[in-house]
């Protein structure tokens, strides 16, 4: 691993260790852990989970950018893996959907998050939810473990997204699928605009162009790739004005470029091909 990637991972781990020690209100007010908050809005990324069955408020740190469990087509008895599981929010919703006969595995590389999630699961008395410390670029899971993989605003923080999709493909069972919420870009953001966006929402810093993001899935062999939800992430004007000025803000608004939260679904084929004619 390159030194730059190691440095980025260390920064992310330290940031989310701090977030694990804060409450939801602090995390929402800090705008994904950044320091450039606006007086217009505090909650730009996370969606409202309160209407979903299985929701546990104490596990919701307000860090997501979508509702992947709403779209993940989880069935009773499924094995579900949540990448970057945090305090367990999506895992507990998934657990309601997969039921007592299923299993949910949360994977996170921040020890403080794992500790918090395990404490939540123990308090709730859930026996079929497991939290594992590990890196989603090298998952400590066997091949063909999961029926469903979910993730919420995590891949944008990972240096090697191609490797993550390779690992998702490996741990999914043939015919399994994923539903992932993440942050992507469309069009070219001027440096001042991008800088101000990153100050306001740290989750933007690792975001890829949307088409390049989807192409990583195609290259890995995923099929039926579908955008289940897409919504714009609006950076408040007062934040943009600080860095870009009036002319920069106007140019951005007229450019058609933007930052989006998307939830993407894709399937691992039932039969894989490797050119040898014998793969199943």
Image (cartoon, rainbow, N blue to C red):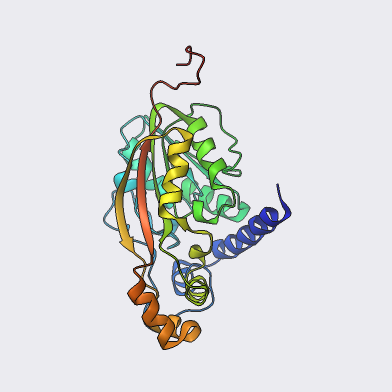
Q: Nearer the viewer, residue 73 or 222?
A: 222
Q: Nearer the viewer, residue 73 or 22?
A: 73
Q: Nearer the viewer, residue 97 or 159?
A: 159
Residue 38 seen in the current view:
no
Left or right relative to 187: residue 84: right
Looking at the image, is 208 positioned above or below residue 278? below
Q: Position of residue 172 (x, y in %)?
A: 46, 31
Q: Position of residue 154 (x, y in %)?
A: 49, 53
Residue 33 seen in the current view:
yes
As drawn, which residue projects farthest toward the left? 51
Question: Which residue is pictured at 53% across the width and 72% down the height?
Answer: 34
Question: How many numbered markers are drawn?
Answer: 0
Question: Which residue is pictured at 64% across the width and 55% down the height?
Answer: 9
As drawn, which residue projects farthest toward the top? 278
Q: Quadrant of residue 91?
A: top left
Q: Quadrant of residue 16?
A: bottom right
């Amino acid at each position: 691993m390159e030194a730059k990637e190691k440095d980025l991972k260390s920064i992310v781990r330290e940031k989310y260790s701090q977030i694990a020690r804060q409450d939801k209100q602090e995390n929402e007010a800090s705008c994904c852990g950044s320091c450039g908050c606006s007086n217009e809005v505090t909650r730009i990324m996370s969606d409202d989970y309160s209407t979903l069955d299985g929701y546990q408020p104490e596990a919701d740190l307000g860090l997501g950018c979508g509702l992947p469990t709403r779209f993940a087509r989880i069935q009773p008895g499924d094995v579900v893996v949540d990448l970057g599981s945090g305090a367990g929010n999506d895992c507990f919703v998934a657990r309601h959907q997969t039921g007592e006969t299923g299993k949910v595995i949360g994977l996170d590389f921040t020890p403080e998050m794992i500790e918090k999630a395990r404490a939540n699961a123990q308090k709730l008395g859930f026996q079929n939810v497991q939290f594992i410390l590990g890196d989603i670029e090298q998952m400590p899971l066997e091949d063909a473990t999961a029926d469903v993989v979910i993730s919420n605003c995590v891949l944008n923080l990972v240096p090697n997204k191609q490797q993550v999709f390779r690992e998702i493909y490996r741990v999914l069972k043939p015919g399994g699928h994923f539903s992932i919420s993440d942050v992507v870009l469309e069009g070219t953001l001027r440096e001042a605009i991008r800088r101000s966006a990153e100050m306001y929402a740290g989750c933007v810093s690792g975001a890829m162009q949307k088409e390049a993001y989807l192409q990583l899935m195609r290259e890995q062999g995923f099929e039926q790739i579908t955008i289940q939800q897409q919504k714009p992430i609006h950076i408040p004007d007062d934040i943009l004005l600080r860095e870009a000025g009036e002319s920069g803000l106007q140019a951005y608004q007229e450019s058609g470029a933007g930052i989006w939260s998307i939830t993407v679904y894709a399937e691992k084929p039932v039969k894989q091909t490797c050119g040898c004619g014998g793969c199943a």
